[in-house]
Amino acid sequence: MRFTSRPKMNYMPGTASLIEDIDKKHLVLLRDGRTLIGFLRSIDQFANLVLQQTVERIHVGKRYGDIPRGIFIVRGENVVLLGEIDLEKESDTSLQQVCIEDILEEQRLQQQSRQEAEKTKHLALKERGLVMPRSDIMDEYGVQHQY
Amino acid sequence: MFRFQSLDEDCTLEKEEGLVEEEDEIDQFNDDTFGDGAIDDDWQEEHKRLAELEEQKNDGLGGLGLGTLGMGGMGGGNASTVHLPPPASRVPHPSSLPPPHHSLSSIPPPGLEERGGGDLAESLAMLILGVDPAIASVGGPAGPDDRSTGLPPPPSIPQQHHHPSQLPPHHQLTPSGLPPGPPHLSLLSYQQHQHLLRRGAAPMQQMNSHNIWENNLGFGPVSITPGLITQMEDSPLMSIIKEVGLPNRPPPMMSEDGRDLSERAPPPRSSSPVIGSPPVRAVPIGTPPKQPMSHAMNHHHHQQIHHPTAIHVRAPVQHRYPPSFPERISPNTLLNIANSPLCRPPFPAGVGPVLSQIQRAQMLNSQVAGFPRGCQGPPLLPGGGGFRPFFGQPPPHRMGPHPGGPPPPNHNHVPCPIIRHNTTHLHPQHRRMLTQRMQSRGGERGGRVGDWRSRDPYSNLMSQREKEWVAKIQMMQLQSTDPYLDDYYYQNYFEKLEKRQERDRDGVRKEHTTKLITPQVAKLEHTYRPVQFAGSLGKLTVSSVNNPRKMIDTVVTSRTDDEEKREKQVWNKRRQILYTVEKMYSLLLEVQDFEKRFMQTPEEQREALLEQHKTHTLQLYSSLKEKEWDDRVSDEQCLLIMSVRKGKRLISRLIPFLPPLQAATVVMGIARNLPALAKKDKQDQVLCWLVEPIAVVISSLSSASLTDLLQELQGSEGQLSRVLQNKFGVTLLYLILSEGERMQSSNPTCQLMDDNRWTELVFSVTRELLNVPSSSLSPPLFTPPNLLSLFSRYVDRQRLELLQEKLQISALSRCVWGCA
């Protein structure tokens, strides 16, 4: 976390705390793979986050699309990482924004191709006698279903 | 213990005069039970007031008591600054007010009395009217051009008044569907919203708290900005309010009770309001603190007043965006505004002056009123990326009348390194480094801070107090009674660093070397001591979250050391014996298998095998021996082995392999200790396994050794009787005797008779046999046939017959050499 420009209200010097990050724009990566961008408004001791004006950003290749979502409350355990967005540098990106429909379509295609690749790989391995657990059809108890 | 010390004074409810002492304790218990986060508002008082209001309302209030509004501190009494549509005739008569379940917007604050109040009253009336979309359409700035959907013409207002029943359908704008009535502001476009807002008819915005019951001025969240109605309509809360209506309250709580209600804060986390019942006050532990302004004022570092024009831009497609709240003004500023203009009794000490919704709304309004509305969006996204500003119009930069707002502290100064008390837990070296770091960086960013912060209408949703609260929790996790145990690497790292620095400095500046002071939290004694009142018997046990009730009395029962030792010894010994037996067995098996192997191995290796065999045998034997004596078989060892069932089996298998002498000694040993063995064998009854091998041994015994054996058997006093009681013993005896007989009969020159021992022994045996009661005489495994002839030698006829009878021996009896 970089030290902000406001007067030093250093709550926990030498520690990592989200307090200094409040009211700043953040990018949050969730465990399910979603990327949220929003203003961090509130936290708690579990690092549950309240994001305001949140936008879910879907990246496909060099393009991305934003879906405005509003207010998010994220349970702390589901956060992989988060980081402050430098507002000045935010626009210096080489990524190209497209509209939501397009990006969703692209995402769908990407998922599809990935799944197919996975399937062929799985099949190839199976032919060789190696059954690898497929993470996508693994449910919460670690049970795999062969469909 | 999870106590926020610094928050304690806030949590402890400062009692106003009139509240009794016990309530203090009760509340303390409440805190104990529910933790510090529990709301300490007195819901009873609250409820009472509500009830009173209810009654008062029903008494019939005339007109609108706008003066009461004024007392709420409407913009510091500058109601004139509120730009309202020209007062439309009047406000509906309270008595004719529809029952509380009518929609919100249709009802002006119930209980408002027409108290006059001149300007203020009028303006407030306008305010309220302005809220009501139906009413507000009356001329004025809220021109019809603002409303695409035709609001009812002015004449409708009186209609409203007389037909309260119309109002509900008119204004019950539940999210479920559009009302038939005109003024559906949700359809207003963005621009219209803006107009509305610009017009300034946005008096009271109160959506901060969601507690529909909470209202210190006697009415619920009543006045709504037209521009905000849309958003609020979307919120479920508003729908609730519309459906439920509001509690009707008489206006001036202040004047009546003389109590300052402003200290009752809406809980920062409001539980969902249960319709029709008092609000749930008990807030679970872990709830952030309420909003005390006094603290926040001191620490708060950015001041802004937020413009309530947060209307999202992406209206068409996703209209579902949540309505923009009237921004939370920083509590400080609100407070400041609230405080100064009002001649209100000061807040009771210790209770954070929390503002209710109305107050906040008023604050907001007052600020908003005077400000120019034309501002551009906050520079949140300079590049404009993909993130459109949520709000179309940012708040103004700075609020003109900002009465008591503390100047933004340290805005452009180099922030002095604030070493807070909470750094004490850090290693001093660490602390030093941090200060240096902070100082170096402090100068860099003086400038940029203020502006974007001030334009963020949603900032400071988390109050200072809440931030501190979270920080406190995080710091509590760092507390440790044993830092070396908890954070070994941290401590070590800084120690090394110090040492390194010392080394580098060559010890020049000795004064800098500080002794390492590891911050330690004293281990608190947290045992619960039950409360005891003086002079009373017994103790109260108040079980709370911090000292839970003892449910189970667990007592550790452990045997005394002695007992344990003894038991252990016994077990150890047994284990040892078993172990020995096992080892011997393995040897024995080798020996037993020898012959087979011998046959199998080729010629050359037979020699080696033979040697091996001898070794094994010797080993076996040696294991029976005592350590000191080479020749004698250790009785003890034998006995030990024999005490175990497996051991007996072992011996029985072992004896054939022993050299004759040693076998004889073994048998001697057995005979000697027969009673003991018999006793131990009671459970197993396997001594008879030994019969056969012993028989073999006996048959190979010399007369002298036979005599010895018999002597051994008779051994000590009373042994014979015990021997006779045991089957094996009897069998053994018989074996011996029969062998003797055989010797005598077969070889007349045997030396058995040479000394009198044999004779005497036999005599004693016979004597014993005759004396022993039949019942105790245990039948042998078998009866050798020549016993009779033996006895006939030594005893007279009479006795012989007796013996015969007793022992059931007959000349013709054929024995069965069975068992062994």
Image (spheres, coloured by chain):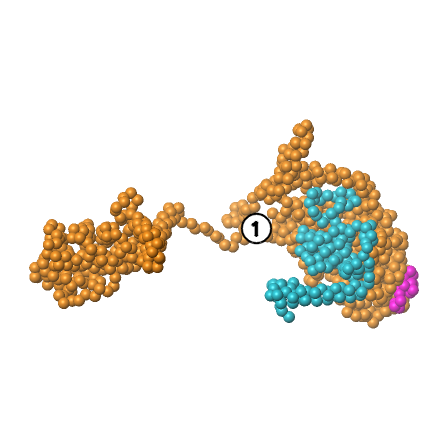
Instruction: Name the amino acid type tagged 1.
Output: Asn
Mark 1 sits on what residue?
B547
Q: Residue shown at 83%/62% (left/top)? A: B314
Residue A120 drawn at (x, y percent): 68, 67
- Is any part of residue B66 visible from this angle? no
Q: Chain B colour?
A: orange
- Within the magenta stretch, is there residue B358? no
Q: Residue shown at 33%/59% (left/top)? A: B599
In the figure, is residue B580 to the left or right of A31? left
Residue A124 drawn at (x, y percent): 65, 66
A20 or B114: nearer the eye? A20
In the figure, is residue B703 to the left or right of B83? left
The quarter in which the C terminus of chain B is drawn is: bottom left
- Is any part of residue B430 visible from this angle? yes
- Within the magenta stretch, is there residue B137? yes
Q: Quadrant of residue A80?
A: bottom right
Colour cyan, chain = A
In the figure, is residue B726 to the left or right of B375? left
Highlighted range, magenta? B136-151
Q: Which is the main secondary structure of the residues drawn in magenta?
A: loop
